[in-house]
């Protein structure tokens, strides 16, 4: 109660200037709402420094234009406090404390919507909760609306630089499978550009003169589309609906909602440094599970042959070898990739699954989401997009002990596609199947909302290491970005960790396949850097088995479920030092993408006993040693470009 009183007092002073201000529980983050000339805008500050300049709000719908004729009719504020647990997040237990502010907005005197803001110490989530409206034609009222344009803006201060990935234009890319969130990130770019009109995917990271800001959205279900961010001009960014060409022009770009109904949560994470960005739980704090899990889903590491052996490896013999290898590694999952229906066949998949189960391993099966929206030829096709075929297939999978599915080439942010994601997830849960999506959108709170959801690709993932030497040379650069951007807001199915020098089955330059430039210790670090609760690694059995035992032991034991995360130091595109905890064991990882070595004295008070250090020499040759506990809890690192250091120790 005390907190509420303080907030309300702070509020009355601010109201004089035609603005109402609410503050985070610790008082450092402030959100102000202004209504001038019957239009609404909001602004934010942290420790009194501007983070967002006054930014217009409002929705343009088929019912009315809710950006003008507006007035603030009511205001309520209180504090919410609760906890939740979800083992598939970067942090298994979360305590939430937020200032909950509701502004009731009318248009021309008729109640229009509530603007709901949740303000945590470093995070804001807000949405529009629309009221039922007077009928357009005749009758009592309108029970639905189409959101033609969301006019929610994010006006960055002068001097902001951007760390963004462009939205892919629908119908572009390989076999017209875009958008799939597979454009590169560019760092430290000026504002003002809008990626050729396509805008940028969430999450969007910005560096302002006084700190860091990440903008994203969460809670997207079949009840809305996935949005992205357009740069209108200069420092003015706004929410944008999907592009018309998504989904081969099927479906609309304008989401429909019932009335009353709401938009997804838009989120803003703010920090003086990057720790609040890397550690945020805002994607999950205000969403809830949409159904009960039908069973206790299992997580851990697994393997997949496709990343090294490509389509050719999807045959009975190689998959059986991977099952044997996977069982020896102590893993429980083998992902059988595309063409299995043609190259292995359903009868043999049943035999393979039976064999896997006898070894304590179960299979994930790949599916093409199509359908009728792109030209990806891989089979099985025309199953996951159709309720009757999908449920029949899932019943078969359940009967032969399949653990889950990887559904590829979704390629659209439209509401119609969000419906397909949700339908696949809900059906899969009925049959006890876990779900991974590739060629996909960013998951928006889905780990908590859909209990059988594992992770999406939605990033330039490990397949590009196979396809391109150039991408191999960018590997450490990209790895410094993902824990701060893409992987900060959702599980990321990257499919990395390899000891191959070349991404091919001969492991040399005689065959096609990218040439790895990162060290083996770097590859081990990838298992800690990229979070995904069921993590299929790019290990190639013959290369892996002949490796030094300490590397194998590390990969066998590294967890895929995490209880806590701490960012120690980072600059996106340059270097990253991050710590994750599994029960009582901390993994502290440092990587370096810069030419000059990364030299630091790290303070690691969380490491209290049994410390092991994995590190590289200047030639990227790795070694392992046991460390004595430092009295001051400080440890030196010297990480060469494309190398890594990993500390493992108990708290
Ligand atoms: Ca892909």
Image: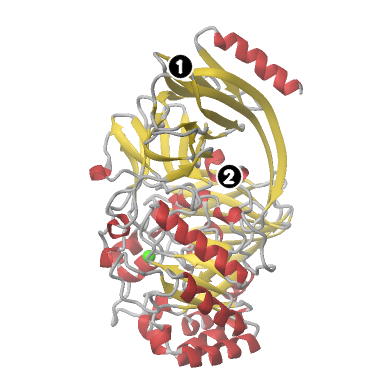
From the Cβ of disc 1, is ligand 1 less than 8 Å away? Answer: no
User: Which mark, residue 35?
Assistant: 1
* Residue 537 is at least partly visible in this image: no
Residue under label 2, please give it.
Answer: 279
Q: Disc 2 or 1, which lies upstream in sequence? A: 1
- Could you say where residue 475 lies in the image, as x and y percent from the top left? 39, 60
Could you tell whether 558 is left or right of 107 in the image? Answer: right
Report crowding for label 2: few under 14, some 14 to 19, many 20 or more residues within 10 A (C-alpha): some
- The span from disc 2 to disc 1 (Cα, nearest Å) is 34 Å
Residue with the most extreme front position: 139
In the image shown, does 547 or 85 lie closer to the viewer?
85
Q: Quadrant of residue 233?
A: top left
Q: Which residue sits at x=49%, y=24%?
A: 44
Callout 2–callout 1 Cβ contact below 8 Å:
no
Report crowding for label 1: few under 14, some 14 to 19, many 20 or more residues within 10 A (C-alpha): some
- Could you say where residue 410 lies in the image, as x and y percent from the top left? 39, 63
The N terminus: image quadrant: top right
Residue with the most extreme left position: 196
- Above or below, 78 against 589 in this view is above
Residue with the most extreme top position: 16
- Could you say where residue 112 lies in the image, as x and y percent from the top left? 49, 27
Question: Viewer-nearest of labels 2 and 1?
Answer: 1
Element on which disc 2 rests: helix
Q: Which residue sits at x=55%, y=92%?
A: 351
User: Which mark, residue 201?
Assistant: none
Q: Give the mark count.
A: 2
Could you tell whether 237 is left or right of 570 in the image? Answer: left
Element on which disc 1 rests: strand
* Residue 242 is at least partly visible in this image: yes
- Above or below, 541 against 19 in this view is below
Quarter of the rendered image showing ligand 1 = bottom left
């Amino acid at each position: 109660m005390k907190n509420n009183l303080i907030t309300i007092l702070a509020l009355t002073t601010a109201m004089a200037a035609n603005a109402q201000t609410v503050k985070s529980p610790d008082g450092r983050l402030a959100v102000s709402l202004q209504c001038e000339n019957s239009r609404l805008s909001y602004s934010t500050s942290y420790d009194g420094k501007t983070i967002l300049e006054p930014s217009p709000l409002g929705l343009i719908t088929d019912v009315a234009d809710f950006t003008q004729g507006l007035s603030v009719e009511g205001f309520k504020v209180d504090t919410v406090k609760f906890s939740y647990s979800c083992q598939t997040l970067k942090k298994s237990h979360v305590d939430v404390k937020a200032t909950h502010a509701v502004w009731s907005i009318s248009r021309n005197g008729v109640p229009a919507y509530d603007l709901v803001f949740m303000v945590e110490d470093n995070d804001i989530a807000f949405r529009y909760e629309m009221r039922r409206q007077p009928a357009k034609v005749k009758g009592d009222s309108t029970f639905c609306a189409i959101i033609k344009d969301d006019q929610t803006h994010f006006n960055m201060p002068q001097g902001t630089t951007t760390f963004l990935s462009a939205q892919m234009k629908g119908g572009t890319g390989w076999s017209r499978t875009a958008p799939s969130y597979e454009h590169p990130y560019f760092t430290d770019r000026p504002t003002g550009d809008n990626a050729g009109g396509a805008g940028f995917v969430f999450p969007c990271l910005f560096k302002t003169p006084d700190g860091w800001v990440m903008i994203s959205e969460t809670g997207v279900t079949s009840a809305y589309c996935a949005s992205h961010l357009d740069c209108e001009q200069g420092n003015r960014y706004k929410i944008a609906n999907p592009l018309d060409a998504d989904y081969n022009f099927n479906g609309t770009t304008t989401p429909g909602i019932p009335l009353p109904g709401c938009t997804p949560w838009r989120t803003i994470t703010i920090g003086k440094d990057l720790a609040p960005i890397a550690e945020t739980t805002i994607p999950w704090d205000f969403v809830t599970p949409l159904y009960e899990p039908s069973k206790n889903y299992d997580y851990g590491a697994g393997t997949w042959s496709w990343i090294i052996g490509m389509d050719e490896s999807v045959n009975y013999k190689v998959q059986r070898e991977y099952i044997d290898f996977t069982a020896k590694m102590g893993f429980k999952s083998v992902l059988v990739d595309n063409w299995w229906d043609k190259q292995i066949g359903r009868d043999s998949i049943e035999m393979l699954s039976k064999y896997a189960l006898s070894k304590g391993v179960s299979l994930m099966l790949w599916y093409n989401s199509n359908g009728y929206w792109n030209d990806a030829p891989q089979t099985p096709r025309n199953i996951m997009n159709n309720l009757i075929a999908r449920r029949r297939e899932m019943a078969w999978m359940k009967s032969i002990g399949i653990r889950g599915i990887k559904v590829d080439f979704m390629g659209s942010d439209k509401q119609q596609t969000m419906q397909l994601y949700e339908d696949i997830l809900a059906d899969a849960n009925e049959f006890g199947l876990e779900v991974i999506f590739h060629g996909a959108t960013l998951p928006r709170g889905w780990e908590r909302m859909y209990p059988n959801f594992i992770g999406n690709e939605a990033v330039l993932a490990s397949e590009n290491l196979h396809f391109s030497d150039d991408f191999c040379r960018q590997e450490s650069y990209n790895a410094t970005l993902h824990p701060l951007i893409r992987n900060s807001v959702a599980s990321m199915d990257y499919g990395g960790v390899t000891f191959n020098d070349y991404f091919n089955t001969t492991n040399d330059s005689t065959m096609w396949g990218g040439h790895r430039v990162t060290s083996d210790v770097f590859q081990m670090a990838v298992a800690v850097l990229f979070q995904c609760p069921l993590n299929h690694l790019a290990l190639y059995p013959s290369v892996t088995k002949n490796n030094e035992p300490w590397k194998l032991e590390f990969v066998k034991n590294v967890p895929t479920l995490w209880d806590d995360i701490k960012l120690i130091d980072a600059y996106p595109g340059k270097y990253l030092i991050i710590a994750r905890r599994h029960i009582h064991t901390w993994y502290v990882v440092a990587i370096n993408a810069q030419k000059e070595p990364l030299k630091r004295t790290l303070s690691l008070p969380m490491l209290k006993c049994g410390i092991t250090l994995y590190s590289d020499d200047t030639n990227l040759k790795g070694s392992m040693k046991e460390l004595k506990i430092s009295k001051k809890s400080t440890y030196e690192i010297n990480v060469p470009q494309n190398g890594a250091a990993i500390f493992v120790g108990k708290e």
